[in-house]
Amino acid sequence: MTALEFDRDVAATPDSNGGSPVLRFEFNAEGSGQNTRIEYKLVDHMAGHSAKASVVLEGRIGRDDVLDLAESLEFGEIFNPYKAGFPDLSEKMPSSWKDSGGAVHVIQRISYTGNPAPDYLPTTDQFLASLVDYGIEA
């Protein structure tokens, strides 16, 4: 398997009509709670390893913002954890893991939760501002 053959079924890509993107990661808009949980993982298909985690961000991400996020991410799911303010999951990989150079962090699921958000993580607004280009210039 090549680096380009990763889980495309989890990605989000624009539809063929140029409209809203088709989400390929799960978004549960039916949940309750004042905060947002984002489940993500580090995947290295060439090496055959992955590590998962979730973070709770203060505030709720709405459907329109989720669609904007999906359009802004590479293949609709790949993101840079440093840019997003999330922990890099490379330390959670097995000790036998040798980075093949094709490892990527991907979003798997966005939902709502009543769990508190830790102070060291960004708010939902800060998270979105770091990854979504809203076309606003200062």
Image (cartoon, helix red, strand yellow):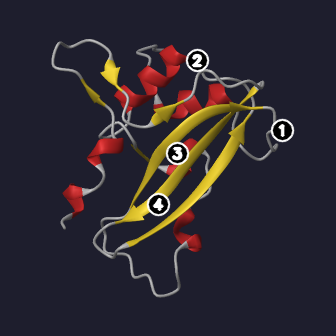
Q: Are marks 3 and 2 in contact (CB under 8 Å)?
A: no
Q: What residue is at 17 percent from the left and 13 percent from the top? A: 17
Mark 2 lies on a secondary structure that is loop
Mark 4 lies on a secondary structure that is strand
Near mark 2 (Cα within 10 A), the count class, few <14, some 14-19 or many ≥20, is some
Expressed as whole percent of the image width and height from the top left, the position of residue 10 reads 36, 43
Pair 1/3: label in front: 1
Closer to the chain start, of discs 1 and 3, is: 3
Closer to the chain start, of discs 2 and 1, is: 2
What residue sits right under mark 3 in the picture?
Answer: 83
Near mark 4 (Cα within 10 A), the count class, few <14, some 14-19 or many ≥20, is many
Q: CA distance from mark 4 to mark 2?
A: 25 Å
What residue sits right under mark 1 in the picture?
Answer: 116
Closer to the chain start, of discs 4 and 2, is: 4
Give the image quarter of residue 116.
top right
Relative placement, left or right, of 109 versus 16 is right
Q: What residue is at 45 percent from the left and 28 percent from the top? A: 69
Give the image quarter of residue 46.
bottom left
Expressed as whole percent of the image width and height from the top left, the position of residue 78 reads 39, 46
Tag 3: amino acid:
Lys
Depicted 131 relative to depicted 138: above or below = below
What residue sits right under mark 4 in the picture?
Answer: 42
What residue sits right under mark 2 in the picture?
Answer: 62
Q: Are marks 4 and 2 in contact (CB under 8 Å)?
A: no
Tag 4: amino acid:
Leu
Q: CA distance from mark 3 to mark 4?
A: 15 Å
Tag 2: amino acid:
Gly
